[in-house]
Image (cartoon, grey):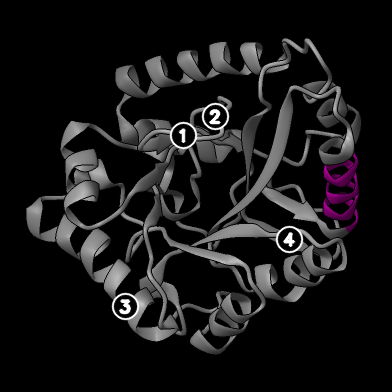
Amino acid sequence: MRQPRRSLYLLYHELRPDETGYSYVIDNKTFDAHLDCFVQIRANSDSNLCPEITFDDGHISNFQFALPALESRGLRAQFFITVGWTGQKAGYMGWQELRALHAAGQLIGAHGWTHTLLTHCDGKQLHTELGRARLMLEDKLGASITTMSLPGGRYNRRVLDACQEAGYTHVYTSIPRSEPASPGFTLGRLNVRRDMKLEWLVALFSPDSNVLTRLDRQYQVKAAAKSLLGDRVYEKLWALLNRKEPDANAAEAMPQ
């Protein structure tokens, strides 16, 4: 008997009309190709994985470019919003765009208040990053907010307990793993980089693919490096390897 398909949550950040050297910015043409691929995979019963789309941070390109591309294909994504940036930070959505995104049937979750790594927060800061962010989204959108994605993918037991206390039912990490139809409290996601070409994605979702297993091994190596180097040194190394743009803050930009 065939096992139920598992979900693989894919994490995007910013879209742009043209290609860029920044690893976590995807050009529109490539994103369109990804979505067309996902539509085919969802209709292909041979695939063991079902692609699910998520965005972190709340960049304005999510509204300008991602929403029309999703709607034209009948797809829905989850958008995790850095709430303190909404209507305040240049290049990010305001409440008008966020309400329109929600009204279009897209899913909204929280991504903290300031994008601070939650493992660096004391109790008062956690209340702001988790509780205040959720309540502000609920007040502005008139909808229940129960999902949270972890800035930088960082968490520990204290952070997860604080997420539960703040009212979240699902917390999204940056661990590249698939999830069952009824996932647990924490869910894994795969960061999508500009070097992940269409052929690579096709191979990822192919039956009996071992790509996800290799990605998990790479993640374990990165996790060991973070622990050994510490966040500050790791952020500088990450920015160098991923061609962080001059006006970007490393702690803000670093997805994993």
User: Which residue is the site of mark 2?
Assistant: 179
Judged left or right of residue 173, residue 167 is left
- Mark 4 or 3: in front is 3
User: Of label 4 and label 2, which has the lower sequence position?
Assistant: 4
The quarter of the displayed image where residue 181 is located:
top right
Question: Which disc, if any, is residue 136?
Answer: 3
Residue 14 part of the magenta-drawn span: no
In the structure shown, which secondary structural element does the residue marked by tag 3 occupy? helix
Question: What whole-number distance in Å separates the C-alpha atoms at marks 2 and 3?
Answer: 29 Å
* Labels 4 and 2 touching (C-beta < 8 A): no
User: Of label 2 and label 3, which has the lower sequence position?
Assistant: 3
Identify the amino acid type marked 1. Pro
* Label 3 CA crowd tier, 10 Å (few <14, some 14–19, many 20+): some
* Labels 1 and 3 touching (C-beta < 8 A): no
Identify the amino acid type marked 2. Glu
User: Which residue is the site of mark 1?
Assistant: 183
In the structure shown, which secondary structural element does the residue marked by tag 2 occupy? loop
User: Of label 4 and label 3, which has the lower sequence position?
Assistant: 4
* Label 2 CA crowd tier, 10 Å (few <14, some 14–19, many 20+): some
- Mark 1 or 3: in front is 1
Question: What whole-number distance in Å separates the C-alpha atoms at marks 1 and 4?
Answer: 28 Å
Residue at image position (75%, 47%) is 21
